[in-house]
Amino acid sequence: MFTPAVTVHVNRDSSERLEAATATFETAKSFTLLLEGHDSPTHVHCRLDDELARVASLPQSNYYVEADARTPVPIEVEAGGLEDPVQGYLEVSTGYGAESAAIAVTVEPGPDRVEVDESLSKPQRSPTVQSSEPAEPLFGDLGLPGDVGPAALAALALGAVVVALAVALAVATIAGGTAAVAVFAVVAVVVVAAVGLRFRPSSSR
């Protein structure tokens, strides 16, 4: 992963000299201060001003920079919770403060800040779930198969007529007399008429 960096040249062309490669620096994440040694070795002191120290930190303040060598100084930045940019200074000094260089650093809000959709905080209604199971057959409660057709119904009705006529005939035989025969005839006529009306073909309109 690429880490941004800012460079300060140490003792280039003369002793006790510091020269920043840039006067300003912007970042939204941790970066590296590169202390680039040149003619002679020296001790370098690094610090962050109060504003920059709110969001950044150094592992230590003092570094020994060898001649013709590069000394990296990692600077940790915590920008994830920022609402607005933070501006401060990274200061580098040598010779007990006789020579110094300052870089204006701007820390931008981090890209990992999550925007929360306000609609997500509102209660969500659960969608109505419709059953995909087929409806119970009309004759399920009667113990009959659900796919009973007209022919089967006609057979059942005919059986009922036969039973009714048989019962009426038995009553007429046991009771005897004209009244019993009349009752049998009435029952037979009513049952036959009801069956005929039930299964009469419907006329098309």
Image (cartoon, helix red, strand yellow):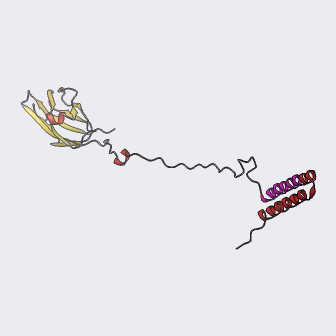
Range of magenta residues: 143-168
Looking at the image, which residue sits at the far left? Answer: 98
Quadrant for the C terminus in the image: bottom right
Camera-side residue of 86 and 199:
199
Q: Main secondary structure of the magenta part?
A: helix
Left or right? Give the position of 123 relative to 194. Answer: left
Whole-percent x, y for residue 158 in the image: 84, 57
For the question of whether residue 105 can be seen, the reply is: no
In the image, is residue 58 above or below residue 87?
above
Q: Count the numbered circles shown.
A: 0
Left or right? Give the position of 21 relative to 165. Answer: left
Whole-percent x, y for residue 97 in the image: 8, 29
Whole-percent x, y for residue 111 in the image: 30, 43
Camera-side residue of 37 and 123:
123
Looking at the image, which residue sits at the far bottom? Answer: 205
Quadrant for the N terminus in the image: top left
Camera-side residue of 189 and 156:
189
Camera-side residue of 86 and 177:
177
For the question of whether residue 106 can be seen, the reply is: yes
Displayed quadrant of residue 179: bottom right
Displayed quadrant of residue 17: top left
Instruction: Please report the residue visible at 22 percent of the width from the left and 27 percent of the height from the top.
Output: 59
Whole-percent x, y for residue 93 in the image: 11, 31
Q: Is residue 106 magenta?
A: no
In the image, is residue 154 above or below residue 119?
below
Displayed quadrant of residue 34: top left
In the image, is residue 80 above or below residue 172?
above
Left or right? Give the position of 127 relative to 105. Answer: right
Instruction: Please report the residue visible at 70 percent of the width from the left and 47 percent of the height from the top.
Output: 141
